[in-house]
Image: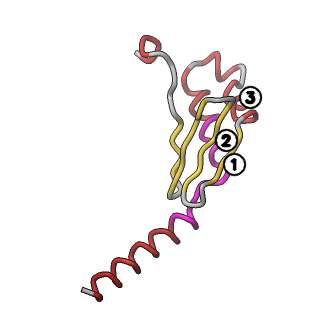
Amino acid sequence: MIRLLLKTAVVLSMIAVLALATNPTPEQHREKISQSVSSRSELASLLRLGRVTAFFSEYYSLGVASYTKVGERTVSVGAFGYVHVIDQRAPAEAR
């Protein structure tokens, strides 16, 4: 029983260290936001709306994960080196 608990603790510690080491940086979040917004339309790409949105985003790190916000909206979340941009368009626009 103690061996199982020890193994579990070691595995969880290794996962936590991996998450800390691969937490996405502010630059990774901003680059992904820029790419995502620019890919939505040619006009957004032409006006560089992705760069503007990324510039005004605020980065928050939780140690093992991170996220960015623009105003009160969460724009992206990231962990283990991966950044996901949240698409917050209205359902009718998303089609």
Q: Is mark 3 on a helix, strand or loop?
A: helix
Residue wearing tag 3: 52
Which quadrant holds residue 65?
bottom right
Label pair 1/3, CB-CB below 8 angstroms: no
Residue 54, numbered circle: none
> Quarter holding the N terminus?
bottom left
Q: What element carries label 1?
A: helix
Q: Which residue lies furthest to the front in this view?
A: 1
**Total marks placed:** 3
Magenta residues span 19-34
Identified at 44% across, 69% down, the residue is 15
Residue wearing tag 2: 30
Identified at 59% across, 50% down, the residue is 66
Closer to the chain start, of discs 1 and 3, is 1
Residue 44 sits above or below residue 60 on the image: above
* Other-residue count near label 3 (Cα within 10 Å), few / some / many at <14 / 14–19 / ≥20: some
How far apart marks 1 and 3 lie (CA) works out to 14 Å
* Other-residue count near label 2 (Cα within 10 Å), few / some / many at <14 / 14–19 / ≥20: many
Residue wearing tag 1: 27
Please provide percent x and percent y for residue 73.
61, 30
Q: What residue type is labelled 3?
A: Val
Q: Residue furthest bottom?
A: 3
